[in-house]
Amino acid sequence: MTDVVIVGGGPGGYEAALVASQLGGRVTLIERRGLGGSAVLTDVVPSKTLIATAEVMTTLRGAHELGLRLDGSADLAKAFRVDLAAVNERVLRLAAAQSDDIGTRLRAEGVRLIEGTGRLDGTECVIASTADGDERLKADIILIATGTTPRELPDARPDGERILTWTQLYGLDAMPERLIVVGSGVTGAEFASAYNALGADVVLVSSRDQVLPGEDADAGRVVQQVFERSGMAILSRSRAQAARVVGDEVVVELADGRTVTGSHCLMAVGSTPNTVGIGLEQAGIATDSRGYLSVDRVSRTTARGVYAAGDCTGVFALASVAAMQGRIAMWHSLGDAVGPLDLRTVAANVFTAPEIATVGVGQAELDAGLVNALAVMLPLHTNPRAKMRGIADGFVKVFCLPTTRIVIGGVVVAPIASELIEALSLAVREKLTVDQLAESFTVYPSLSGSIAEAARRLHVRSTDQALPH
């Protein structure tokens, strides 16, 4: 029987454990904090649970336009207040329940679970350090899935009370009077959006011209306009260099000498990989200049028999990608059929309000001349279902190859973009043409109808070289 040792119990680790057990491996998984890792305990599950609550408040604020009134003609949203302590208690309870469910499933599949930390001793042994001491584990196959930790600025160290990382927000028992969010990437934008919807006064400090600089530029523009219209203050082209607690306030110092004062500050300035002190050097495992593990498309590191999955590889910080990397590692190492990881088919979502979902080729690649493609963008405000729901912001964008009309990418900006992107994800994965996408039936009225309509508009003469987006 093949001995498989997995260090880290996040999506990359526990999904790999399930596959390895299914394929007949003798599997041991080492996790120090709790099964599910950061994705379940502090990142994805908690943040999206919080965002789900924020979405309800956003819906309530739009109720007046839909004709919903309270007695006395009061705004429906004003009849509710957010009990942040209760919200966070629910967030943590759901995260713990999800972690327990993962543990139950792993044990049922025969996976041995060790609570502790793991470090490699060469490429055929892992040392598990627990409260009871060290245990040497023989390993034919090793998977490293140790994740990342929130990055900290030297002059803005989190204290867990006023200056916070996103893992510490769930300890708040009262709504911040004024929340300064440093960082306008995905994490910063999501929390800024959520707390703004929950009623906090939010200031978003962005070092770039526009929020979400890594996303589709048109999508980022829509989200920024929504943020600003809702009353959020956005400090563009502003780089935070320090934060300090002064009494009951936090003062954030910007690089140009300005200061911003709030009751709390969320530092969302990226992550650092958990790859120090786990025996990489002794095993001959290479990392890049930032400390991320170097892996190929079947999750192999530079050491024979050692694989890696998840955020510690720096490939794509998504739980779905981590899980797929872990599965691919086990399929490959245990001799099952496997295809290499194809990032062109990965669907990603930013859980702001509205959401941004993407798959495949993006607008930036077209604009840079890296891809020759046709593009169509349809605003959602013309969609009948959007009108019924009071949705004024958002769009659907579809990209296809000029000659074959094969769908190669898409963007959806909408309240439920994470659900709508699946049709485009399937089209990209299966190399469907715009005609095939357009000929599928959509419900009338539906937001998904805009995807089919965009595809229909890409059915043009083969002599056409481009379409306006």
Image (cartoon, rainbow, N blue to C red):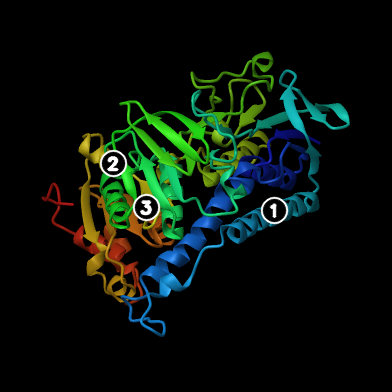
Q: Position of residue 141 (x, y in %)?
A: 71, 30
Residue under numbered circle 3:
356
Quarter holding residue 257: top left
* Residue type pointed to by label 2: Gln
Residue on which the image places disc 2: 210
Q: CA distance from mark 2 to mark 1?
A: 36 Å
Which is nearer the eye, 1 or 266?
Answer: 266
Report helix, strand or loop for mark 2: loop
Q: Locate residue 421 relative to residue 403 in the image: left or right.
A: right
Q: Position of residue 269 (x, y in %)?
A: 45, 34
Residue lying furthest right in this view?
132
The one of 155 and 98 positioned closer to us in this rendering: 155
| Amino acid at the residue labelled 3 | Ile
Image quadrant occupied by the N terminus: top right
Question: In terms of depth relative to the viewer, which is nearer, 231 or 106?
Answer: 231
Q: Amino acid at mark 1?
A: Ala
Crowd tier of the residue under label 2, counting other residues whose Cα lies within 10 Å: few below 14, some 14–19, many 20 or above? many
Does residue 70 show up?
yes
User: Percent x, y for residue 167?
Assistant: 58, 42
The answer to which of marks 3 and 1 sits earlier in the sequence is 1
Residue 254 position within the rendered picture, expressed as x and y whole percent measured from the top left? 36, 29
Q: Find numbered disc 1 in the image and state the secondary structure of the residue it sits on.
A: helix
Identify the mark nearer the N-term, 2 or 1: 1
- Name the residue tied to disc 1: 96
User: In the picture provided, is 449 more to the left or to the right than 164?
Assistant: left
Question: Comparing marks 3 and 1, which lies closer to the viewer?
Answer: 1
Residue at (37% x, 43% y) in the render: 204
